Amino acid sequence: MSYDMNTRRICLFAIIFLLFSASGQSAPTGSDLLLACNLAQEEGYDSIQGQMCTWYVIPCNCSMDPAIPESCTPENMEVHELADIIIEVLTGNDILLDKTATMSAAIILSEKFPCEL
């Protein structure tokens, strides 16, 4: 049976999701995001870590949760530039490292790129 690259990526993502679920964590943390983005920078963004980093650093402002802050990130920003910002702020920031990856990234990007009213 032959699998294409997208099928493999989906399977790897599902395995990672199951590992987080099995460990009692409902979602990746800021610490997990920091690790994923560091690995993505070293190994490229085509790895599963690169995909995780990309998922969290590209803001969608699509959350229905009002507790998650929105950001107005410039459209011309590259993933690696956003990852640089995330890595810089997360490094040594125990408060954000313990939050979910979604919340950590949202806080960082909303402070760096606030939306004007």
Image (tube, rainbow, N blue to C red):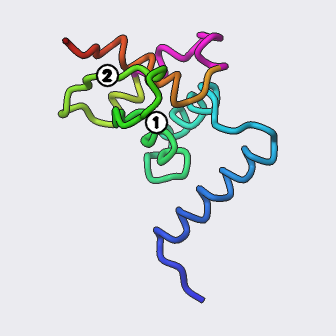
Say which residue label 1 marks. 56
Instruction: Estimate how packed mark 2 is, as few (under 14), some (14 to 19) or many (20 or more) residues with alpha carbons within 10 Å.
Output: many
Q: Residue at x 63, y 10 (%)?
A: 95
Residue at point 19%, 33% (across, down): 75
85 relative to 78, above or below: above
Magenta stretch prevailing secondary structure? helix
In the image shown, does 35 or 60 lie closer to the viewer? 60
Report helix, strand or loop for mark 1.
helix
Closest to the observer, 64 or 105: 64
Seen in the picture, residue 113 relative to 2 is either above or below; the reply is above
Q: Quadrant of residue 30?
A: top right
Q: Closest to the observer: 88 or 55?
A: 55
Residue 116 vertical position relative to residue 9 in the rendered view, above or below: above
Q: Residue at x 48, y 14 (%)?
A: 89
20 shown above or below 70: below
Q: Secondary structure at mark 2?
A: loop
Number of numbered discs overlaid on the protein picture = 2
